[in-house]
Image (spheres, grey):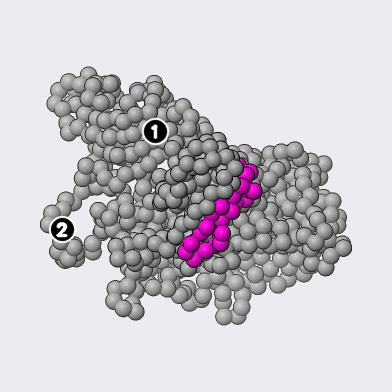
Amino acid sequence: MQVFLWDTADDQENYLSEVGICGYNKINFNLTTFIMKKTLKITQLVILFSCSFFGIALAQPTLLKSIPSGSINFVSSEGRLFFTSGDSLWTSDGSTSGTYFIKKTGEPFVRLTNFRLGTFIYFTTQQADGKTALWRTNGTGANTTKVAAYAQINPFVVYNNNLYLGIDDGIHGYELWKLNLSNSLSMVKDIVPGSGNGIAYYDIIVSSNILYFTAFAGPGGINIWKTNGTESGTVLAVDLPFTDVYYNGLGLKDVNGSIYFARHYKLEQSISDTGVELWISNGTTAGTNLLYTYEDEYTSYSIGQFTSLNGKLIFLNTWNNEYVTLWTSDGTINGTVEITALFFDDAISPFFQVKDKLAITSINNNNFQNPFIKTDGTEEGTIYFHNFGPYSSLAKPATTGKFLFFNDLIPLPGGDLEDELFQSDLTPENTKSLRSLFGTSFEYSGNITPAGENIYFTTNPYIYPGVRDLKLWSYNPNKPLGNVPYFTLVNANSDTDIAWLKDGDYIFTSETPQINIRYNSISMPGSVVFKLNGGIYRTENQPPYSLAGDTDGDYNIWPLSTGVYELTAIPYSSAGGGGTAGTPLTIHITVKDSSVFSYSARKGEILDNSESTNIEAYPNPSPDYFNFSILSKDNGIAKAEIYKMDGSLIQTILDDNVTEGQSVYFSWNGNAHQQGMYLFKYSCGSQSITRKIVLTR
């Protein structure tokens, strides 16, 4: 079901008539509940969401309005969206009335940022004289004003209620400046006196509440500096033990108070090959140490995409611009290791963090979208979770921290393909298109922009041949839209919400779950009675109303075991389940061990073992037929199967008796299937082999 906001009652009636809806309810959301939260580590749980809730309004996307077709530069700050169209600035607060044009700047936009000082965010434009202009806006036309214009302006970071920028004013070179809450702009320090540039590249971070940046100053040239915002407090922090940096910048990254960075350099014996070093620093010269050196004759190395995950550094190492491997570091030499190989000759996406895992994908040199991979920083925890449809053209994904959002092609009846918006918690079970969740198409989606736990996005469907209509939507995947009760799955260790729990949901867990389930009432009942599989399980007399209870908001642990459960919550007007009973809410949930067919993302063809000499698949890739040759290691029933990358079985192509030492030959015709990557699995006795095969067109 899709929910829209109409400008007029006539618009609403016309739409309902057009789509054939004969009845509807206007509902307002007014949830009163008491939720106490603590900040601790969340136990990992996997939730499989269904798309029905006994007719209750779901958390489906809400259409805000049509916006100019050329809209770009979508950013959000504290839940509010800003975007541009031509020289016009727009905003949205997630409502139809709150989505409006702010002001025309009369100048093309250079960069829209989400940096906020007080109620203002900042952006830059290009003046007719070639200078860069800095602006600020609070979402109103009257308070959208130009702050300053110089030869070069780059907003960097907000630190201690000041916006720090790199500015070339035409006199002092490119130096560090700051803008305060009173809209006063000043240079922090002329690091290289005169017209020379002081600021080096875009390396500027906050680590242990100190602002660090790279500068062309101090012994040897480039070094790491720090500042407290004053001229006297802007000083050399790390005297780097090298003078040459081949690539632009060091890629400063803070991980738990430690600063990681990379130094790329040209190899002396080569014209084009490069080496790279990984360093760690505590912000002092004495506390700066080399962790790892990547250098080999006739090979160029590059490391980057520094990301913090579970207290460690995660990064990519690319050699010869072809082979991409995943690495991690705990800040020690022995703890700086390769996790696994990922891609070959691919264009790599950024990392996207969802809970305590990262997602990444790539486009190969044939312009095919490779599967999404997730990692927890270990080899065994680095696996595929989504295989893209053929000819998918991935819009920029985005994450809210709980869900990853991206677009992909899905097959429609009749063989057509449609570009739709997907959401995922990085499990194959819960990677679903919004079309499958809500029954409405969100085709040609893009401009996916997180805003807290919600997202904004656009669709661009044809309204008639050759003409598209760019529509802006908002979406909250965490609770219903209406004034209705619902259940929330809660982490009982951290007392934080995990997900909205709906009828038909599955919970998969590979370890003992530490969870509870909260009933969210639409009012303040005298009590709530919980029933489990028909029997009374618990009665709660005060909020938060939870299945396993709590102590002053500190949730107890529900002793969960695998099985199918019917959960019912009944509100009563009096304590102890007395007085008048309200409308019961019932859902059905299934708790299972993780049973997804899992497979490593390691680049080697053999995924389950190293028996690569015992199997041949040819040709691979292939536009149709694959031939297989296997040397059997056991006597017994041999089975060969073809799987999709999400683990679903397509076809069993062999189920027959074989003998030890026998060469087994068979084939598979992929003509009826979409192009992409598939898995071939062979098993017989103790022998088990899995190989990736690629179907092309």
- Specify whether residue 98 is in view: no
Q: Answer with the quarter of the image where residue 184 lies.
A: bottom right
Near-viewer residue (319 or 15): 319
Nearer to us in this view, 674 or 283: 674
Q: Is residue 223 left or right of residue 185?
A: right
Residue 359 point in image, percent of width and height: 53, 50
Q: Residue at x 29, y 62 (%)?
A: 413
**Mark 2: amino acid:** Ile
Provide residue 29's location: percent of width, then percent of height: 26, 45
Above or below residue 254? Residue 3 is below
Q: Judge left or right: residue 23 versus residue 226.
A: left
Nearer-N-terminus badge (2/1)? 2
The answer for how far apart the CA atoms under marks 2 and 1 are is 38 Å
Q: Residue at x 63, y 43 (%)?
A: 610
Magenta-colored stretch includes residue 611:
yes
Q: Which mark is drawn over residue 21?
A: 2
Q: Which residues are magenta?
A: 604-630
Residue 531 appears in view: yes
Mark on residue 216?
A: none
Q: Image point 26% across, 35% down: which residue? A: 587
Tell which tag, 2 or 1, sits nearer the viewer: 1
Q: Which residue is mark 1?
A: 592
Query: Residue at 25% across / 59% down in the picture?
Result: 5
Secondary structure beneath dot 1 equals: strand
Disc 1 residue type (three-letter)? Lys
Closer to the camera in the image, 425 or 154: 425
